[in-house]
Amino acid sequence: MDIKLITLTAAFAIASAMAQEGDTAQAAPEQNSAPAAEVSTSQTTAATAKAAPAPAPAAKPAPAVDTATTAKAPAKPHGIAYNNVGNPAASPTIRDNLDKPYKMAGINLVYMEPTSEFSAVAFGSGNTKFISFENYNNLAMATVGLASRGLGISLSYALAKELTFTETKDPYEKEDEDTYTVGANDILRLRLALPLGAFDFNASAFWLTYQNETSTDTEQKDADSKSTTETEYDYWDLGATVAISNDPSAKNIFWNAGVNFTRHENSYYRESKSGSSSTKTETTGKDAHIYIQPSFNIGGTILRNEFARVLLGVNSRAPFIFYDEFKDESNHNKDSYFTMGVYATPNIFAELKLGNCWRVFGGANYTWAVFSMESEEFITDYNDELDIVKSSITRMSSRTGVATASLGARFQYASFAVEASIEDNFYSNPFTGFSDTNNDFIANFGAFIYF
């Protein structure tokens, strides 16, 4: 009898579980639902009154879950005021995410920062689209991009180009002149980033005009002859950066390493043709060089409790600059010049949570020129090929720079957040921001709306 009663109870429990399973296929499961199997009060009493233990109720199968909707939501980025010391272990800022476009995936927000004239918006339920506006020196620069969990790309541009066509003619002669001008700070930049298991990879390439440059083509024709003149000034930087970090897998220690390559062009070219004769002039400026800079940044948590944490880190770089050889004024020989160095920037960053809405943060750092060297070789006297006086100078130094510290705060309520940091001069004279014409007692001030 006992065995039959137990068997009936178990069968009823299994049947009830199967019925509920069918119901849950049509209705969303509640977060805290009742047990899968229910039995009547009399059956429960009869079953528990016996010495033999009742069989465990059948486990309710977990409902099918759409993994696309349950993936970990990306962290809400901070504003530019946060982590101005660049500690890799700090939470990401909106600027950090734009530098690694794949990190914009899944984020829907709008950000405005009037102090630096910067704004950004990100939207989309599948692939995230994002746009940002800022000033690159005296030009507005726009960034457009697309991000998914596996890849992010973006394109930034600031334009200052002008093309002029001039034609002059009379009954005897005609002159055509085409002028192409590119203004300073005209830039085009492409970024790409993606996660690679425990690491992530990001790369960027850019073309920047750092000084106004003009190219001119002139053609003169008459009944008997034709002459052309082409002149070109080149003042541009062409560069690329590649980097890798342990962001996807880091727990306490965060690091990133990369290298930057830049060609800094400074040259002048002129070619003239008239009939069968031609002349050509090429000049390299003294500032033309190749720039290579490896970098390595590391940071981690050294103190932590429920409400606060302190991060310690160091950002380091080792630039090498190889200047083009150029002819000296006597036009007989070439000079050479290069610089190199190792620079380290130790930093401290701390943040404290105050209740549910407030958070204060601050950072301090200084830059130490651990080792810097420049070497130059030049001609001091030239008489003839057998009588050349050369001089070379090598300078080495090590120097610590000035320490700086900053303080800021974040207020967040529901989907709104605002962040600000204070200018250094505010601490020495709190009223200077109101008394001077700049009113610049706030270093960075920005606000988010999250969706």
Image (cartoon, rainbow, N blue to C red):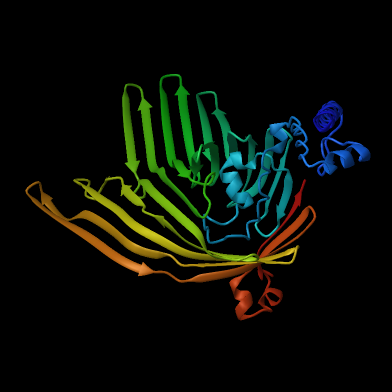
199 above or below 77?
Answer: above
Q: Nearer the viewer, residue 372 or 175?
A: 372
The quarter of the picture where the C terminus appears is top right
Question: Residue 68 location in percent, x, y?
Answer: 69, 33
201 above or below 435?
Answer: above
Residue 45 placement, left or right of 368: right
Q: Residue at x 51, y 70 (%)?
A: 404
In the displayed orientation, state which residue is furthest to the left.
386
Q: Nearer the viewer, residue 318 or 89?
A: 89
Question: Residue 84 location in percent, x, y?
Answer: 56, 61
Q: Residue at x 46, y 27 (%)?
A: 220
Q: Residue at x 27, y 45 (%)?
A: 325
Q: Nearer the viewer, residue 317 or 434?
A: 317
Residue 416 placement, left or right of 102: right
Q: How many marks?
A: 0
The quarter of the picture where the N terminus appears is top right
168 above or below 225?
Answer: below
| Residue 270 image-quadrant placement | top left
Q: Is residue 33 visible?
A: no
Q: Is residue 323 visible?
A: yes
314 above or below 67?
Answer: below
Question: Residue 248 location in percent, x, y?
Answer: 54, 44
Q: Residue at x 65, y 57 (%)?
A: 116
Residue 158 placement, left or right of 49: left
Q: Nearer the viewer, residue 8 or 430?
A: 8
Question: Residue 49 location in percent, x, y?
Answer: 85, 43
